[in-house]
Amino acid sequence: MIKLKTNIKCGACVATVSPQLDALPDSKWEVDLNHPDRILTVEGAASETEIKAALETAGYQGESI
């Protein structure tokens, strides 16, 4: 399980990143919009590098926590 602090702020942001995160190999993900650091949790085969690249493609950032 990989957890990243993100700058995803709302449901519209989640909709924006969904195509990129859904394309990660054999992975499930969710963003905790109630957490102040908007934690992205990814379970599966995707590496942290792949996840960060997917976020950046959508215009967002992820930081290791």
Image (tube, rainbow, N blue to C red):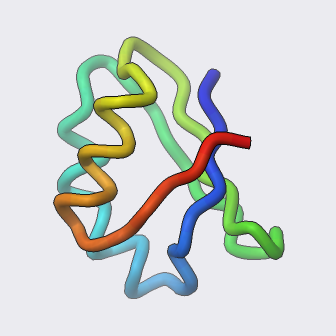
Q: Is residue 9 left or right of residue 53?
A: right
Q: Is residue 18 above or below residue 10?
A: above
Most distant residue in the top direction: 45
Percent of width and height locating residue 53 = 26, 44
Give x and y (percent) for residue 1: 63, 21
- Residue at image coords 18%, 38%: 23
Residue at point 54% right, 24% down?
Answer: 43
Residue under the image location 38 percent in, 12 percent down: 45
Judge left or right: residue 11 versus residue 21. right
**Where, by quadrant of the figure, is residue 17 drawn?**
bottom left
- Quarter occupied by the C terminus: top right
Q: Position of residue 7 (x, y in %)?
A: 54, 74
Q: Is residue 16 above or below residue 30?
A: below
Q: Is residue 34 left or right of residue 32?
A: right
Residue 9 lies, with reference to residue 49, above or below; the image says below
Q: Nearer the viewer, residue 47 or 30?
A: 47
Please give the name of the residue rendered at 40% of the width and 80% of the height, measured from the top-left corner.
13
| Side (left or right) of 49 relative to 59 | right
Image quarter of residue 36: bottom right
Quadrant for residue 31, please give it: bottom right
Q: How many marks?
A: 0
Residue 62 position, x and y percent, is 50, 54
